[in-house]
Every structure is written in structure tokens, then in C-alpha cells.
Amino acid sequence: MISSSFKPVNEIVTLEPSFLPNDPTLSNYETVDRRIPLLQVFQNSVIVTTVGSTIKVLLAITTAYALVFIRVPGANIIFLGILVALMVPPEVSMLPNFMTIEALGGRDTLWGIILPGLGTAFGTFLLRQHFKSLPKELFEAADLDGAGHFRKLFQIAVPVSMPAIATVTLVTVVNEWNSFLWPLIITDTRETMTLPVALNQLRSVEDDVASYGILMAGAVLVIVPMLIIFACLQRYIVAGLTQGAVK
């Protein structure tokens, strides 16, 4: 994909393809920039991903903490409801979400993209299982020092749970960045489109075989930021997913 994004058309549509471009060119990226407002849609994706991921991770942390360390009536029933939410395909909620957001005036806005997906059942489930494996002695000592729930959460639970939180953050960021169906439905103009939606629009414009280099350039722009984030956080993934699995 990266190699093809730097190839001219005659090196892509050929009977003797080469792995590396013989005559590298930036024309494919220049074409992408001309066809779609690249800076605008990239900024939209960054805003949606940053705001949405931050709120989702914060809600997952606080919800998981409440289910484990605060005596909430019916906590097990609430957790069961979270597990059920994991089994429901997101497409099922598209229509009610669209009707709700449109009624609130959020159609074709960035907050309209962000709002319906702020809850994260996966993150809550993973962090709850991790919090249950933390030594109770840590929190008993904090109680003796007079610490409230806020201090116990952000001075004890969060610092010792960074691998699990980093895993939830990585999964959430990737899902937010790559989200396609909901932003496609709720946005109408290029000013509010995210990168995956703009790339799809680029595909609808470029229908001939000569467009492969342009499409590969667009795909690189979508994928590379996530590869960088993944490279920075990947060492936490295994530790985060396996913590709490065994005693």
C-alpha cells in the first residue's frame, strides 16, 4: 500500500509489477489533497478521536471502580447489562441514535458524531475485571489514612492499572479513528467529515483503474497515525489483557 502510493499509474497497472517504485512521485498525495479538504477532515478525525476516547476511557475507569469498590444496589445486574451490551451489534442502534441526534440538532456536527458512542462496554468490562484483582490491602490502608473514593481512584487504582488502562485507551482510539458507518450517516458536508468518510468519497470519485495510487495514498494517511500510536502502546497490550486472568 505504501509503495503503491508513491508509484505513477504505469507502474501500478502493468504486467511486470515491482515491489518498490522505480520512479517515486508525490502526485498521488497531491491529488488526494486537491480532491478532499485533507487538513479539515484530518483535524475533524483528531478532534473526534481525542474527545471521544478521553471521555470513553474516563467513563470506563469511573464505572468500573464504582462496580468494584462502591456498594451499589444491583451492581451485578448493572454489570450483566454491560455484558449484554457487548453482544448487541452497533448497527441495531443506528436508527434510534440518528433520530435522537437529529432531534437535538446534532446532525452534521462533530459532537453529533461523538455523543452516541461515549459509553464503552468493553472498557468497563476489562477494567472491572482488573480492579477486582488489585490487592484489597492497598485500599484498606487508604481508608485508614482517611482517603475518599476520589483519592483511592486516582492515586491508587489508576497508577497501578496503567497497562490495563493503556490497553483500553489503544482499543478505544483505534475504534474512534476508524469509525466509518456512524460518521457517514450523521454528516452531510465535507466540513464535518472524518478521514474514513472522506476516503470513501474519494473512492466514489475515482472509479477507473488509474485511481489505485490515489486510493493507496488516502489509505496511508488514514492508517499511519494508528500505526504510530500502536507502536507506542503495543507493549502494554499483552500485560493489560492478561492482568487479572490468574491469581
Image (cartoon, rainbow, N blue to C red):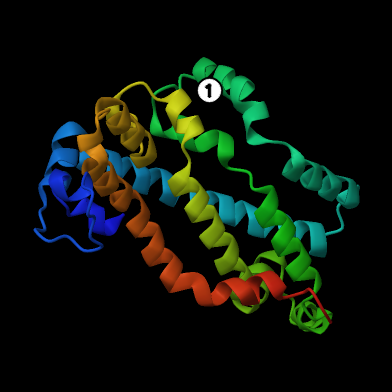
* Residue under the image location 32 percent in, 37 percent down: 199
- Tally the marks: 1
Residue 11 visible at all: yes
Q: Nearer the viewer, residue 100 or 87?
A: 87
Judge whether 192 appears above or below 5 on screen: above
Tell me the kind of residue under disc 1.
Ile
Instruction: List x then y, in percent, for residue 90.
Output: 64, 35
Q: Which residue is disc 1 drawn over? A: 101
Answer left or right for 157 relative to 11: right
Instruction: List x then y, in percent, for residue 198.
Output: 32, 34
Splitting the image into 4 quarters, where does residue 2 fall?
Answer: bottom left
Quarter of the figure with the N terminus: bottom left
Instruction: List x then y, in percent, for residue 124.
Output: 70, 55
Splitting the image into 4 quarters, where does residue 18 fall?
Answer: bottom left
Splitting the image into 4 quarters, where does residue 209 fall?
Answer: top left
* Residue under the image location 53 percent in, 35 percent down: 115
